[in-house]
Image (cartoon, helix red, strand yellow):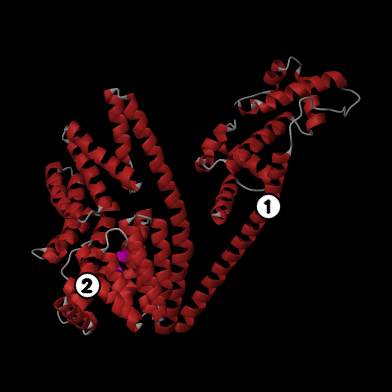
Amino acid sequence: MKKILLFLALFYILLNGQEFTDYRERYDNFEENDIRAFKFLNPYIGKAKEQKNYAELTQAYKDATSFSPDNKLQYADSMVWAAAKSKNRDLIGASYLTKGTIYYFNYKKFKLALDEYLKAWTYLQGSEDEYLHYKNLYHIAVVKSYLGYYQEALHLFEKCRIHYGNENSHSNPPNLSYNNKKGYLNSLHQNIACLVEVGRLKEASSLLNKGFRETAGDIDFYIERSYFYKLQGIIDYKNKNYDRAILNFNNALAGIEKKNDFTNASTIYFYKGKSLLNKNETHKAVSYFMKVDSIFTKHLFILPEVRENYEILINNSKRTGDKKMELYYTSQLLKVDHMLSTDFKYLSEKIHKEYDTKDLLEAKKRLETSSANANRTAAILFCLLLLFALILYLNWQKEKRIEVKYKDLLVKINDEGKQKPTDKPDYKPKSSKLNEEKANDILSKLSQLEEEHFFLEKSLTLNKLATRLKTNTSYLSEIINDYKGCHFNAYLNQLRIKYIMHKLYHNKSWRGYSIKALSDECGFSNRSKFSEAFYKSSGLSPVEFIRKRNKELDEDH
């Protein structure tokens, strides 16, 4: 017993006598998600807490995000807290950046990742730590690339690649050289990916050769080399060299599957399947397309370029006559389209309203302080800012008008919801020319037809409705004008807009329909007439109403 107590005492003294770097050295060689690192991380965290050394505590929590397979976000939140306690802007920005990377890479939550990147940007845009500044810029460029803004992303990736390439020197300390080289290779990878997307394959191949040379024989960067193999495979596919493409995809999968990067694995399975399809090896090809579906089912994430995967599977199911699988893949494609449209709408608004504005203001400051023609530059930028302010003001006025119209509309919708239909409508004659009894009979039948949504029928005419009500067009037209207060077409439009507005307000799935689909659903012959009638009835466009309703529900949650 004494020996055990003595051992524990010595162990405690040993731990407390260690420098923080001693802890890191003990887990430095562990691979990502290796929980053995916590044998050293936990005392590291405890010591940093005890000493209230928030800079070291931030580092400890950051390392914990790397080695924890299941609790990365919890440790990321702790890292943000510790960084805030340190009051060091670089640490705070870096912590938000790490949290965003976890959302992006581990969970593929682009909305949440972008939010964290933008928080990081507020702290790092003026940072003297250029590594952090360009790291943040890199991640924002990744989101731009995902959205399909390849030219904009390409410009940012080139800036990052050049910066990290210049900083990647052997005179730097080993950890800084490693970080800069990793930043360089990641920027190079994304740079090439954008070139491939815009069809500049020769430039992409030239940069790929650099990537392969930089990673040759270097075990520290085997993952980055895997990404280069993936891109080479895509270029081979585009050049119709399918055998070579498959070989490169196999080389890429060795590292990417080990890293559990399901996004890039999904892309590789898709292109490998298409390569096999072009070799007429349909059965093998379909097995890879099914792997893509398995990844989407598990993670509910897919890249836009892989969407075609489901069109191929649907067509294959039709070819084989498998109705059950055709229905399944059609349902999956609807989920894919909903996810993509949701992410793209949110991210497009976010990245242009929040990032581009910040980038513009930053450019203004830099030009004002560094340009030899500062006065002329300031005048130009002042005009731009005035224009920008005018646009913001007009948008504010527009939003204010939309808000007023929307609130008025809510009152109307809620009032209509409280009204209770009666069995026998009590119509009072409004014109001495109309027979009260006959008018009431037609109006009662008309009310019944309204409940049956007769107005959703396309190409409905006054003559058709008069025939259905067993009356003549002149008498029906006069009744509608006198009792409904408008002509026949306006009466139909009012009913249709009221119906579609009710659906959009109460049903989330309807708010995901296109304007053309909504137009078809409520009986309009084309979308322009539908939009015009919607605006005339509500003072809002269909898009504005849907946006306000979604925002209202988001704020409620």
From the image, tell me which residue sits under label 2.
40
Residue drawn 76% across the image and 16% down it: 471
**Neighbourhood count class around disc 2 (C-alpha, 10 Å): few under 14, some 14–19, many 20 upward:** some
Task: Give the residues drawn in magenta, as a range.
Answer: 155-160
Image coordinates of residue 400 in percent, x first then y, are 65, 59
Callout 2: SS:
helix
State whether residue 531 is above or below residue 7.
above
Q: Nearer the viewer, residue 505 or 460?
A: 505
Q: Nearer the viewer, residue 402 or 111?
A: 111
Answer with left or right where residue 335 lies relative to residue 60.
right
Q: Amino acid at mark 1?
A: Lys
Marks 2 & 1, CB-CB < 8 Å contact: no
Q: Nearer the viewer, residue 438 or 45?
A: 45
Q: Nearer the viewer, mark 2 or mark 1?
A: 2
Image coordinates of residue 242 in percent, x first then y, are 15, 42
Q: Amino acid at mark 2?
A: Phe
From the image, tell me which residue sits under label 1.
407
Image coordinates of residue 6 in percent, x first then y, are 17, 80
Residue 156 on the magenta span: yes
Residue drawn 41% across the image and 59% down it: 112
